[in-house]
Image (cartoon, rainbow, N blue to C red):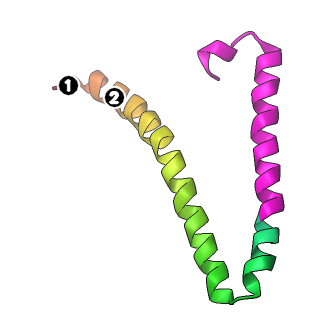
């Protein structure tokens, strides 16, 4: 958990509710968009799914790089590597 959420159960539950609500909105909009786009062509449905995957990857890439930097940084410091 984030430092600002430690020891604050109400803030943690608020963040959890926001994440769950966002997932629920995505789960509701996905089939709705597929139904609307499928009228044109199924190929367009797959293009929409590809676009949503690319958006998700772009939005998550910052978090992934931050986690990898923190994880790999500790390993490199233990081995005696220095940062430039």
Labels 1 and 2: the sequence-earlier one: 2
Look at the picture and state if 10 lies above or below 18.
above
Instruction: Find the magenta span and give its range.
Output: 1-29
**Residue at left offset 74%, top offset 9%:** 7
Compare residues 39 and 68 and report the one nearer the observer.
Answer: 39
Instruction: Examine the image and state in which quarter residue 3 appears.
Output: top right
- Residue 55 image-quadrant placement: bottom right
Left or right? Give the position of 1 relative to 17: left
What percent of the width, then of the height, locates residue 45?
Answer: 67, 80
Q: Is residue 76 left or right of residue 40?
A: left
Which residue was labeled with disc 1?
Answer: 83
Q: Which residue is mark 2?
A: 73
Q: Secondary structure at mark 2?
A: helix
Q: Residue at x 82, y 69 (%)?
A: 32
**What residue is drawn where x is 76% and y is 22%?**
12
Mark 1–mark 2 Cα distance, whole angstroms, equals: 9 Å
Point out residue 43 in the picture as x, y percentages from the top left corner. 62, 87
Q: Which element carries disc 1, helix, strand or loop?
A: loop
**Residue in the foreground of this view, choosing between 28 and 84:** 28
Q: What is the number of the mark on residue 57?
A: none
Is-magenta flag for residue 65?
A: no
Kindly indicate whether the residue at mark 2 contacts the one at mark 1 (C-beta within 8 angstroms): yes
Picture mark count? 2
- Which quarter of the rendered picture does the N terminus lie within? top right
Q: In the image, is 69 to the left or to the right of 82?
A: right
Q: Residues within 10 Å of mark 1 (few under 14, many from 20)?
A: few
Magenta stretch: dominant secondary structure: helix
Residue positioned 61% across, 21% down in the render: 2
């Amino acid at each position: 958990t984030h430092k600002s959420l430690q020891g604050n159960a109400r803030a943690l539950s608020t963040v959890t509710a926001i994440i769950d609500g966002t997932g629920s909105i995505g789960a509701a909009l996905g089939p709705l968009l597929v139904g609307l786009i499928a009228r044109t062509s199924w190929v367009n449905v797959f293009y929409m799914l590809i676009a949503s995957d690319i958006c998700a990857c772009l939005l998550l890439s910052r978090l992934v790089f931050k986690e990898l930097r923190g994880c790999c940084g500790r390993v490199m410091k233990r081995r005696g590597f220095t940062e430039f």
